[in-house]
Amino acid sequence: MVGCAVAFGQAGPAAHWRLDETMGTLASDSSPNANDGTLVAFGATPWTTGVHGGALTFNGTQHVSCAVNAGLPAYDASGSP
């Protein structure tokens, strides 16, 4: 799953989370806007091997939380294999 948010009136994504990190507790935003997300309810080693870099496995209670940002519309996203 790759997350991406588009802000109206902006010439590109407001945020782009690749979720391909290999360590740490942040999901880095690769857009120029730095809307990083914090991993919530993951264990001590949340990252696993992915196709390109790292990956996250979600169990239904885990999520990535982002701070309120006026340029980022509120939404929920979910996915399944």
Image (cartoon, rainbow, N blue to C red):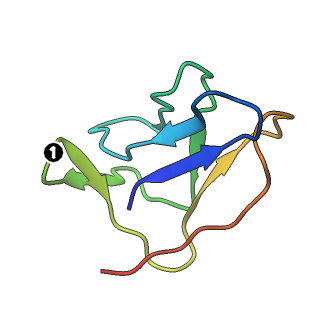
The number of numbered discs placed on residues in the rendered structure image is 1
Q: Quadrant of residue 69?
A: top right
Q: Amino acid at mark 1?
A: His
Return the x and y of residue 28 as percentages of the image width and height: 47, 32
Viewer-side residue, 80 vs 25: 80
Could you say whether the residue bearing mark 1 is in a helix, strand or loop?
Answer: loop
Residue at figure coordinates x 51%, y 32% from the top left: 29
On the image, the x and y values in percent for residue 23 come to: 32, 36
Q: Residue at x 58, y 37 (%)?
A: 15
| Relative horizontal placement of residue 52, taking residue 20 as reference (left or right) | left
Towards the viewer: 46 or 14: 14
Q: Is residue 33 left or right of residue 24?
A: right
**Where's the C terminus, which quadrant?**
bottom left
- Measured along the vertical axis of the image, is residue 26 above or below residue 33? below
Query: Label 1 crowding class (10 Å Cα cut-off): few <14, some 14-19, many 20+?
Result: few
Residue furthest top as drawn:
32
Horizontal and vertical percent position of residue 48: 22, 54
Answer left or right for 31 relative to 8: left
Q: Quadrant of the N terminus?
A: bottom left
User: Which residue occupies 43% across, 58% down?
Assistant: 43
Placement of 53 over or under 43, stated as above or below: above
Q: Which residue is mark 1?
A: 52
Horizontal side of residue 23 vs 38, given as left or right: left
* Residue in the picture at 15% in, 45% down: 52
